[in-house]
Image (spheres, rainbow, N blue to C red):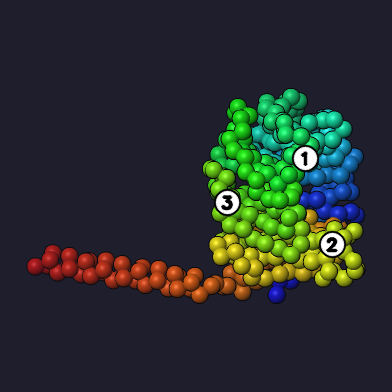
Amino acid sequence: MIRPILLKGHERPLTQVKFNVDGDILFSVSKDQEASVWYSSNGERIGTLNGHKGTIWSIDVDQNTDYVITASADFTGKLWKAQTGECIYTWNFEAPAKRVEFNPESKKALFVTDEVMGQIGTIKIFPIDHLKDEQASTAELEIKNDKGVSARFTVAAWGYGGTTIVAGHANGEITKWDVKTGACLGRVKAHEMQVTDIQMAQDKTYFITSSKDKSAKLFDVDNLRLLKTYTSDAPLNTACITPVKDFVILGGGQDARDVTTTAAAEGKFEAKIHHKIFQDEIGRVKGHFGPLNYIAVHPQGTAYASGGEDGYIRLHHFPKSYFDFQYDVEKTAKAAKQQELERQKQEEEGADEQAAVSASA
């Protein structure tokens, strides 16, 4: 049984939650125009980031937890000092900003702007100068969607080394882009409906996507090769890859207008845990009273946080049974590895004894 800590600080639906690198701080944003900062150990709220005038769709924190960056429906992105909550810079866009993410070194940031009001959906890349508050107002690279509004960008994430970006599209495609030239390096039809989330593995060599088509999929960054598929019984808004254990966690649920009864079970508002390799569903975590809009996993794999349409964040610290769970084939492989290690140890001890005998002779 996973006992959650319930975090209540937002008045409207959550849009994203994000752990810092150490995992001791959790950041959250919602449709109430406010970002919140929490201790992940006990759910205590440390503070808020105030300044946006519309829904905050996305948030990220740099490698040292010095800066926080946000993307909002108010046509802006903002850079904040994590320690004080001070907004030190604002980028102005021609359309709502739907996603933001620092590159692996936190020296650049990408924004995804929406395709509305005649504006072309764009991925904008800005340099981040950690030595001063003032930032470059002009993007160093813009990747524009030239396939029409049905193929607009919905999400994006940095690949390993920060040399590429992987993007998800409203028509179910995923694309890969060169950060230096803006060239499209690959395009794959990943889903039948909108890609709702992309989250990288910790080494950023592979990633998971989620979609309204009730599936999540694992892809290789290098060639966008499909590795695994996880099916759900409801539209998915989010998916993440857990470190330590070979699991993935999926979240979503039927929109309120599509649910014919008020029962939470009808909407399927559960986090679903699948085995990453074998793809089977191995567990569900209930609790939210609306769709799960985003799931983030603790960097050390000890917990996960889910942000829901119900305005709550549920912070789940995994029990011992989660870490002990293994398939029979995994138990067999572990036992075989242990036997091999013991055999090697015996051979080394035997060689040492033989060397000692030879030396005394």
Q: Which residue is mark 1?
A: 150
Q: Amino acid at mark 2?
A: Gly
Residues marked 2 and 3 touching at CB (< 8 Å): no
**Residue at image coords 40%, 68%:** 337
**Which circle's residue, 2 or 1, is located before the other in the chain?**
1
Give the percent coordinates (x, y) of residue 73: 85, 40
Secondary-structure class at tag 1:
helix
In the displayed structure, 325 sits above or below 11; it is below
In the displayed structure, 267 sits above or below 170; it is below
Q: CA distance from mark 2 to mark 1?
A: 27 Å
Q: Which residue is mark 3?
A: 226
Q: Amino acid at mark 3?
A: Leu
Eye-nearest disc, 2 or 1: 1
In the displayed structure, 339 sits above or below 70; it is below
Q: Which residue is mark 2?
A: 290
CA neighbours of label 3 inside 10 A, class few (<14), some (14 to 19), many (20+): some
CA neighbours of label 1 inside 10 A, class few (<14), some (14 to 19), many (20+): few
Residues marked 1 and 3 touching at CB (< 8 Å): no
Q: Amino acid at mark 1?
A: Ser
Secondary-structure class at tag 2:
loop
Q: CA distance from mark 2 to mark 3?
A: 30 Å
Residue closest to the eye, 339 or 208 = 208
Left or right of residue 312: residue 200: left
Secondary-structure class at tag 3:
strand
Give the percent coordinates (x, y) of residue 273: 66, 65
Give the percent coordinates (x, y) of residue 25: 71, 53
Which of the 4 image quadrants contains residue 342? bottom left
Give the percent coordinates (x, y) of residue 305: 73, 59
